[in-house]
Image (cartoon, helix red, strand yellow):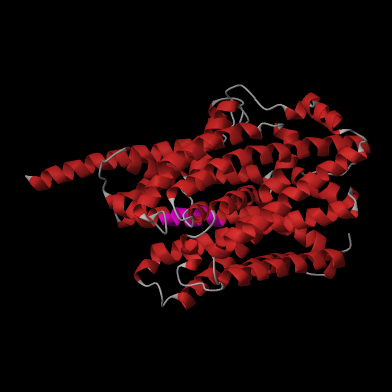
Amino acid sequence: MSPEITLAILIGYFTLLILISWLTSRRSDANSFYTGNRKSPWFLVAFGMIGASLSGVTFLSVPGWVGATHFGYMQTVFGYMLGYLVIATVLLPLYYKLQLTSIYTYLHQRFGVVSYKTGAAYFILSRIVGASFRLFLVAGVLHMAVFEPFGLPYWASVGITILLIFTYTTKSGIKTVVYTDVLQTFFLIAAVIMTIAFIIAQMDLSLGQAVQNLVDDPNTQIFHWGLKGDNVFWKRFMGGAFIALVMTGLDQDMMQKNLSISNIKSAQKNIYIQMILFIIVNIVFLSLGALLFQYVEFAGIEGVTKSDQLFQTIALKYGSPLISFFFILGLVAAAYSSADSALTALTTSFCVDFLGYERNKETHIMTRRGVHIGFAVIIFLVILWFNSINNGAVIDQLFKAAGFTYGPLLGLFAFGILTNRKIVDKQVVFISLVSIGLTWTYYSQMPLWIEGYKAGFELIIINGLITFAGLYLSSLRRKYDDTQRSR
């Protein structure tokens, strides 16, 4: 597909997003950006959240990851289901009861202002890292397919990608994102299904034969048992449960969409439907990965050295024009499906948690737009930095990074919900930094202490447990101080 046609696809897609933004921004007020006026249809949120959860990482990295981990990623997906159940039955009722705009306001009510600001700060750090990881992959492919042939440098390609996202989210925020996510999820899934159909046709297989090939393929092994590796069941399942819990339930980005739904019952329906769809869609993505490897062998394709480049190489260099068309649509959808809500959530958290939005709802619009611009610039710079150091599958790095940055949030919310103990609020920053440091020690030293051991998704659990233990010790100090004051 020529760069001119690819650029035309990008312009057409962006025009459609602008149209949706214009339609949803009519009759918008100060609350539309943050809560969507709590009128979002739950079924649209459920479908759109699939695209936001998958993002460009899943679109490009998961199919190529099959070669190294087989269908082992499904172990993580099964763990997600446990995490989603906790979100639906524990966290959502809490958030709706308190009528939160930012979920980190809970930490203020439960512990104090330092805990509140610390939790919000860790979210902002985590989401900047996560959004940058996700956009990094997609921006690189867009650069190769669209911008590089016109002589634009990589930094300009990244800048244009982020500018487009900023443009259609700046006015109505989450009210617009709920609807654009639906469109983007549709194109993302359609691209995968079309590619699967193309590969099956090229290999002259019936649907039944293709399914049998997948059943017989060693790459479709799901369960991996053992203790030392990073792809073993207990690490993937438990890691998946806690990753879902923190990267959805304790993440302003994902929960902001749930909280834009009018009532708790509908929000819970959204989670339950999302659980079913998430399993189905991930099986489809992993099946694409196995079929891509089969097709590479079938067609004698050589020169694909990075797993993250497998899907794009087949779609753009060996696929039909129709497959290339849908791949570009899916790629652009993947770029925007998570990044638009991430940018909106970062702006929401900073405005609510640090600038006091709820105390000044009507007079801060220009400030909010300035914050929106600021986070767009930060993500731009982080992507350029990550591009200079990247190696390995991005999805693996993403989840490991989450283990360090989301761990303190897990510990804070778990301690707040599971106990009624009070803590010394000003100690929370120190506790969280110690927890991250000890988790890093585990990550870097365990392979030296136990031959063949690889730290994996359990990092987030360990980090959360250490934070929880530190908060418990702080509660003992608080109890002692209270006792001394009462004498």
Does residue 102 belong to the magenta stretch?
Answer: no
Point out the stretch of residues depicted in magenta: 120-128
Indicate the quadrant containing the C terminus: top left, top right, bottom left or bottom right. top left
Residue 384 can be seen in this image = yes
Q: Position of residue 437 (x, y in %)?
A: 45, 43
Q: Quadrant of residue 218?
A: top right
Above or below: residue 21 compared with residue 72 = below
Q: Residue at x 67, y 70 (%)?
A: 19
Going by the image, does 279 lie left or right of 214?
left
**In which quarter of the view is residue 280 placed?**
top right
In the rendered image of this protein, does residue 355 appear above or below residue 132? Answer: below
Answer with left or right where residue 377 lies relative to residue 202: left
Name the residue at 76% across, 69% down.
11
- Looking at the image, the residue that sits furthest to the top is 226
Could you say where residue 423 lies in the image, as x and y percent from the top left? 27, 46
Residue 121 among magenta residues: yes
> Dividing the image into 4 quarters, which one contains the N terminus?
bottom right
Q: Residue at x 76, y 42 (%)?
A: 307
Total marks placed: 0
- The spot of residue 212 in percent (x, y) is 82, 26
In the rendered structure, the answer to whether residue 42 lies left or right of residue 409 reads right
Give 475 or 327, whichever is nearer the viewer.
327
